[in-house]
Image (cartoon, coloured by chain):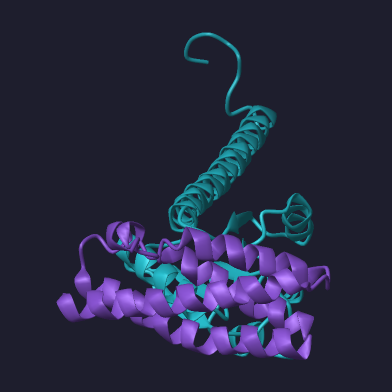
Amino acid sequence: MEKVTNLDFIQKFSKGDMSRVKKYVMMYIQSADEEMPVIEKSFHDKDYKKLKTASHTLKSIAAYMGMERAQQLLKKIEDSASNESVTEEMAHDITQLKEMITLSKDELKAFIAQN
Amino acid sequence: MSKTSTIFIIDDDPMMQNMLKDHLSAMSNFTIHTFATGEEALASGQLVPDIVFLDYNLDSKIANAMDGIDVLREIKAKYPTTEVVMLSGQDKIEVAVDTMKYGAFDYIVKGESAFYRAEKTVFNLFKLAQLKRNAGMYKVLTITFGVAFLIMIIVVVILISKGMISDHVGWF
């Protein structure tokens, strides 16, 4: 299966300092653990402001983990929440996003364990 | 701005806070303080920042927190010489114009290139501060020479009026 994360940027940014890479990866995992449930709950509750904020936050940090597809999905969710145009398609996008986030955390935890 | 310039990073995203702090710390021995809200930064007492990196969407995560524009206005009112650089996840021209209108020095869109842009902006601010210092020095020099020239003219006029110098050639 193709990887959902790409740490090229974060490794280059950290100039090979593995403790820095690990610090950022751990911060991503923590933020993902916080924001993904908020995205699900706010979608369910039709709380568009919260949905927009959480997807915006997660979009920024996912970018540093090289998660392009997740970024696209989060942008779509954020834009729809801004316009308060939440559709059934978004339910599918959120399910897809959740799978991606779970995969990313597994990949990153494996990366930390190996380094 | 000296080498020990004080920089504030005001952002409710801990990852952005950390990454920007780490990146700028590697540039020079700045004193860097990070804050999650504008309120915390404004209440930081005697600390007067030289440069502030300020998130535009500060009120997104913390309910009732001041937004970036409000904090920008307060900082410029409280510390007029402090330069503020806005950070935003939105690449929108109207947001950039809005921040410049209230005195921001620059506007950086968050992303992979944001850290290098921030580094460049700090470098540009140092250059600007140097130019301002030089301009001030030249102004003082010009005034000093002007005053010295005026005093010389006055002395010459006094000496001429007292007959102590004349335009006669030779010894009296």
Tell me which chain appears purple. Answer: A
Residue displayed at 32% across by 68% down:
B29
Q: Nearer the viewer, residue A20 or A96?
A: A96
Can residue A93 be seen? yes
Measuring from the top left, give residue A13's x and y in whole percent.
Answer: 32, 60
Measuring from the top left, give residue A15's x and y in whole percent.
Answer: 24, 60
Compared with residue B46, is residue B71 higher up or lower down, i.e. above or below?
A: above
Compared with residue B151, is residue B125 higher up or lower down, i.e. above or below?
A: below
Residue B59 is left or right of residue B20, and the answer is: right
Residue displayed at 70% across by 72% down:
A90
Q: Nearer the viewer, residue B105 or A30?
A: A30
Residue displayed at 59% across by 57% down:
B109
- Residue farthest to the right, as pictured: A84
The colour assigned to chain B within the rendered structure: cyan
Residue A43 is left or right of residue B87, and the answer is: right
Measuring from the top left, give residue A18's x and y in whole percent.
Answer: 21, 71
Kindly indicate the quadrant of the structure image that contains residue A9.
Answer: bottom left
Q: Nearer the viewer, residue A70 or B93?
A: A70
